Amino acid sequence: MQLRRFCSGTIEVQRNPSFSEITSDDIQHFVEILGEKNVVQDEDRLLAANTDWMRKYKGSSKILLLPNTAEEVTQILQYCNRRCLAVVPQGGNTGLVGGSVPVFDEVIINLGSMNKIISFDNVSGILVCEAGCILENLDAFLANQGFMMPLDLGAKGSCHIGGNVSTNAGGLHFIRHGSLHGNILGLEVALPDGTLLDMLGSLRKDNTGYDLKHLFIGIEGSLGIVTKVSILTPSRPSSTNIALLACKDYSSCQNLLVEAKRSLGEILSAFEFLDSDAMDMALTHLEGVRNPLPPSLYNFYVLIETAGSDESYNKEKLEAFLLSSMEDGIISDGVVAQDINQANSFWRIREGITEALTKAGAVYKYDLSLPVKNIYDIVEEMRSRLGEAAKVVGYGHLGDGNLHLNVSTPVYDDAVFTKIEPFIYEWTSKHRGSISAEHGLGLMKANKIHYSKSSESVQLMASIKKLLDPNRILNPYKVLPSSMLFND
Amino acid sequence: MQLRRFCSGTIEVQRNPSFSEITSDDIQHFVEILGEKNVVQDEDRLLAANTDWMRKYKGSSKILLLPNTAEEVTQILQYCNRRCLAVVPQGGNTGLVGGSVPVFDEVIINLGSMNKIISFDNVSGILVCEAGCILENLDAFLANQGFMMPLDLGAKGSCHIGGNVSTNAGGLHFIRHGSLHGNILGLEVALPDGTLLDMLGSLRKDNTGYDLKHLFIGIEGSLGIVTKVSILTPSRPSSTNIALLACKDYSSCQNLLVEAKRSLGEILSAFEFLDSDAMDMALTHLEGVRNPLPPSLYNFYVLIETAGSDESYNKEKLEAFLLSSMEDGIISDGVVAQDINQANSFWRIREGITEALTKAGAVYKYDLSLPVKNIYDIVEEMRSRLGEAAKVVGYGHLGDGNLHLNVSTPVYDDAVFTKIEPFIYEWTSKHRGSISAEHGLGLMKANKIHYSKSSESVQLMASIKKLLDPNRILNPYKVLPSSMLFND
């Protein structure tokens, strides 16, 4: 079978013939475990669960399971493992690389019904909850307690914390709160053979043996299904300030980052950048968006957020930073949001770029991690490579060395695509970058892992996959090249 | 063979008979790889390398190897694996659980000669260095660049960064900078079979496949030898302030922690506590130490450090916090250090407790992690259990839920020991705590892993050990129960 993606070539993938096909006996067995209403065969609901968020991938699963407890998840897995039925775990289904939908007829296990908060300790800030909790709901719960989730991303209204863990989600506050590997304190995970692995500690420190939970962070559901999460949450800052700054060139953006880390240090909570093409996209295609720094376009814009425990001090500090950066010539212009509406309008520019690009036509999306000093080189290389044929837009989480490079054309064009790939991956590999900073590999990039990981590393990943999932039933065809898993 | 520890019972361990004994041919082979002078057979140097920092454990290795490069490490391992020669990797040898010295005749590989800084990026703060670099030297190097190491511990003058990674070291600034799982960006690791695993990325974000480096953090050298490290370093704060506060009871310490996180939030960089018995120990046994809060002893003391980018603001903020905590009755007294000497004298009390305990006689040491609200219960339980027979001292990293519980007696007493163990482990297990918050398991606690980890988890650890180290040559008898590794 062949899958066709909307705008970046074709992925060929073969159904693993050793997987069984689902039978009415299987369905009867699932009904016994979950009850009738949690075994979904309704066409509309199946279509939604088979289709990814970008509507680029569509599987053909005939069954959607909605467990209510971790025990039910283990019973399903134990059965599927014995029957050799392939399984795709699904959270909010907001991924960008086709990781959370079936490729063929995999059984879909959606964790959405497992959405209870189990405990919150307001001394330590440790939250324990089920995997199906929606990120935004958890943050709203914590807001009432004076705490916040340590991650924030565009999909927060639908993504699940279990999915965030499984994909090691990054997002907007990564520069301040860091990776989930640092914030996740414990997990409960259902293994492919139905074993329930209790690693649900809620301790900040625990050096007793191998810290296995890390094995299940960012593996895109291919080694186990996260059923419960214990996470360290920081105090909610009482004050937040946003500034939008303009720089004349990329090296000024870099200098600004160094200075911001030095002088804002402990209150810096976001450092995002966009180039003039990205700004132009937002201004052209989004309603009600305007550039607060008129009249002409600058080459680069940086959005800085500070967050802390002292309103007036934080604002003064950000304003002073802006002033001194102006005097030093690092920035050409800048404005601090005066109220929450203006702050939201600044964020709207940055967060609206994806939407603007979609409206502009076909888009070829890349999510690269590179040493900060090299980040913008690839945007310029790509521009000179593509010439007038396409618009190249660069933006992203500069503070984390994470570039979202997007190429936009009025309609999809194979000629443009072949000029982008594999060049962009080869270039990234040469500069020891990552071809997927935060989106993961999913189905889309499983075969491209070698651009960012050594063959010894990929070999070890495959060995671990085989150890934990001997029948390879969990999220097949994703993350690792199928050739390493289905040909022995 | 039987090993006798100074003050906490006996550990019985059997040499694995499938390991070879070293021959003159082996030594000749090592000389060919490393050169004569890096193959040490000198008795005095061997004695030092065979003996642990606390002088409780003494192995009988006949050979100490000093590789200069990662390639030499891989050649040694490849040879040892083929010959079935057991190996113990050694860094600064400052561990507290017997993890870094041989148990029998293991080949010692000390990384001390691999101590070069490879690169530092002053935009991102990313440091790449060899594993044998001493923590304090790295911090001194970074100080010149306006950055700092994200971890700090008592042994900083001798411990190696490779050892820190292998033991997932915690320390004094954990509350601010978090776990090494969040700060380590990349590793190069020599596997038991001699494969060199290049995971030495220096990117903050990289979601391409399984993040294997976490498999080698905190595994106490039992799955691979860390040869190079890439680590994210924070900006060095331009101002640091210290206060010593007194609380009347433990629940006030807890309230103080909540308030400190809320109002000092982003500048809080240490939150340590000690009880009056710990203070008394320091005052009695350490020269030149005095309590800055006279005249009488309070029940609890808390040491708070703030660090940030603004001298006057930070000090004012800490003083205001002290004042409001006093007014609210959370603290009974408190003083902010007026200069660096006074700051050092406050730290001297907290950091000197270990030394004071050693001077006081025999000491039974425990390093527990517990939910903050339960932490002091075990100290009180232990006091009522032991009565007049012993002094029970509680101190540690309260901000991280990490208690150092120490029992002191004039001379070692088996009767006291049997009242402590296994009670203390059972109690900790019952409260879902960790029996080793930051010290690791090493030889001392390998058989006690079940108190903190589920049997399914320990089983999976053993499977991973067997996958990566089929001949079990790396750091045998440590971390995992030998019965799980040598009886099949």
Image (cartoon, coloured by chain):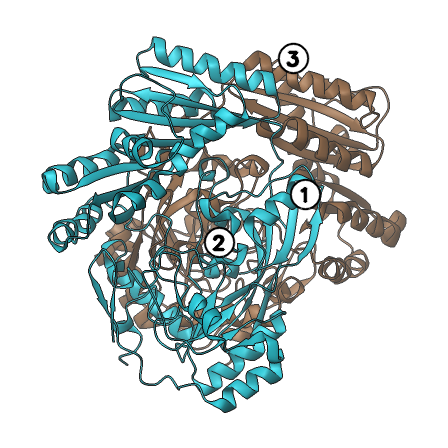
Chain colours: A brown, B cyan
Tag 3: amino acid: Gln
Give the spatial CA distance, label 1 vs label 3: 30 Å
Does the CB distance between marks 2 and 1 fall below 8 Å? no
Give the class, few, some or many, for how many residues have Cα within 10 Å of label 2's Cα (few <14, many ≥20). Answer: many
Vertical order, A434 against A269 (above or below): below
A222 to the left or right of B314 = left
Asked which secondary structure carries label 1, the reply is loop
Q: Position of residue B2 (x, y in %)?
A: 23, 72
> Going from the N terminus, do you reach mark 2 or mark 1 first?
1
- Residue B487 falls in image quadrant: bottom left
Q: Is residue A177 in sight in this rendering?
A: yes
Vertical order, B427 against B40 (above or below): above
Q: Which mark is residue B327?
A: none
Q: Position of residue B327 (x, y in %)?
A: 35, 8
Q: How many labels sit on residues?
A: 3
Q: Which residue is mark 2?
A: B164
